C-alpha cells in the first residue's frame, strides 16, 4: 500500500535496486512515470485515470519544492495539448511531433519537422523526458538553433564552452539581460521558453552561463527538464496527449 496524504493506493509493484551506479548513484530511487506496464500511471490507472502532471521549479534560483499531481486535478484549465505519438519499437517513451523552432520570433532556417521524425525502425523522433537535464537535438537541428541564438547574443561576451555545452557567456556586469526568445513549435501547442530555461549557470563566481541545449550523436532528440521548468507538464495517457501550461508552479 502506497499512501499519498489521505489517499491510499494498494497493489503497486515496486522494485529494489541493489547496485545503483552512474548518474543515479546516491538517489533514494526512481519513480517510473513512463508508458510501460510497470510504470506508476499505468499501475494506478483505475485510481488516477492515467492522468498526472508535474511542475519543476528553477533548480538554480528557487528554494521551493517541485510538485506532482495525479488524477483529474492534474490537468489545469489553461493547458495547450499536443498529441502523443506511438513508437512501437520504443513504446515506453513519450514521443511528440516537433514542427520547428523559432529564435527571436523568426523560424530557424534549416530546422524542419523532417529532422524530428522517427523512421520505420523506430530510430529518431522527439521525446519529452523528465529525467534528462538539457535538451538534446540532432546535429543539424542543434547547429542551426545554436547559430541563430549566437546571432541574437552578439552583444554578450562569450566564454569557452565545454564538451557538452559549447555556447557560454560572461555575464559579469550585465544589469539587464537581453537575449532572444526561443519557441518550440509542437503540433497544436507552442512552448515559449523564458530566459531561465535558456541559460544555466556554470560558474556563479565568474558569472559564466551556458546555452542549455546540446547536440546528440543519435537521431533521437530529447526535450529535457531544464526547458520544462516553470511549466506544468500535463499527461493525459487515456487521451493520448501531453500539454503545457505556462502559469508556473502554483
Image (tube, rainbow, N blue to C red):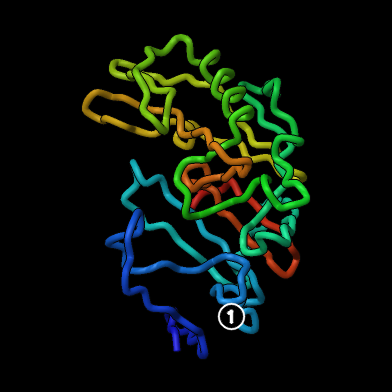
Q: Residue furthest left?
A: 205
Instruction: Name the side, left or right, on which 218 lies relative to 13.
Output: right
Residue 169 image-quadrant placement: top left
Residue at image location 60% in from the left, 35% down from the top:
138
Q: In this orientation, which residue lies closer to the viewer: 247 or 190? A: 190
Give me the residue at 52% from left, 59% from top.
54
Relative image position of residue 161 (x, y in whole percent):
37, 24
Numbered marks: total: 1
Dot 1 corresponds to which residue?
A: 44
Mark 1, secondary structure of its residue:
loop
- Place residue 21 in its image quadrant: bottom left
Residue extending furthest toward the top: 155
Q: Is residue 174 above or below residue 222?
A: above
Asked if residue 163 is positioned above or below residue 104 in the image, the reply reads below
* Residue 186 in sight from this viewpoint: no
Instruction: Decide which of 225, 21 is in the foreground and name it.
Output: 21
Q: Position of residue 192 (x, y in %)?
A: 61, 36
* In the image, residue 80 above or below residue 211: below
Residue 220 visible in this rendered orientation of the protein: yes
> Residue 109: percent from the left, percent from the top?
70, 20
Q: Residue at x 64, y 57 (%)?
A: 94
Q: Using the image as rendered, state which of residue 243 and residue 138 is in the foreground.
A: 138
- Position of 118 with respect to 166 (left or right) is right
Left or right, 201 with respect to 78, comes to: left
- Mark 1 neighbour class, 10 Å CA radius: few under 14, some 14 to 19, many 20 or more: some
Quarter the N terminus occupies: bottom left
Question: At 67% from the left edge and 53% from the top edge, which residue is drawn?
Answer: 95
Amino acid at each position: 500500500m502506497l499512501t499519498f496524504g489521505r489517499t491510499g493506493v494498494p497493489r503497486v509493484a515496486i522494485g529494489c535496486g541493489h547496485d545503483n551506479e552512474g548518474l543515479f548513484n546516491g538517489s533514494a530511487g526512481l519513480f517510473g512515470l513512463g508508458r510501460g506496464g510497470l510504470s506508476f500511471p499505468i499501475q494506478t490507472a483505475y485510481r488516477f485515470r492515467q492522468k498526472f502532471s508535474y511542475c519543476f521549479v528553477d533548480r538554480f534560483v528557487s528554494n521551493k519544492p517541485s510538485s506532482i499531481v495525479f488524477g483529474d486535478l492534474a490537468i489545469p484549465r489553461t493547458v495547450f495539448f499536443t498529441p502523443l505519438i506511438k513508437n512501437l519499437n520504443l513504446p515506453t517513451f513519450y514521443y511528440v511531433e516537433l514542427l520547428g523552432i523559432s529564435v527571436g520570433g523568426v523560424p530557424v532556417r534549416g530546422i524542419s519537422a523532417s529532422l524530428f521524425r522517427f523512421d520505420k525502425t523506430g530510430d529518431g523522433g522527439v521525446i519529452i523526458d523528465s529525467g534528462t537535464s538539457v535538451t538534446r537535438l540532432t546535429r543539424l537541428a542543434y547547429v542551426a538553433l545554436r547559430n541563430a541564438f549566437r546571432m541574437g547574443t552578439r552583444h554578450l561576451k562569450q566564454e569557452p564552452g565545454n564538451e557538452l555545452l559549447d555556447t557560454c557567456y560572461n555575464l559579469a556586469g550585465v544589469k539587464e539581460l537581453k537575449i532572444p526568445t526561443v519557441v518550440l513549435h509542437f503540433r497544436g501547442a507552442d512552448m515559449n521558453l523564458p530566459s531561465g530555461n535558456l541559460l544555466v549557470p556554470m560558474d556563479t563566481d565568474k558569472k559564466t552561463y551556458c546555452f542549455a541545449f546540446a547536440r546528440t550523436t543519435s537521431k533521437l532528440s530529447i526535450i529535457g527538464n531544464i526547458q520544462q521548468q516553470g511549466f506544468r507538464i500535463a499527461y493525459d495517457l487515456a487521451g493520448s496527449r501531453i500539454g503545457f501550461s505556462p502559469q508556473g508552479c502554483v
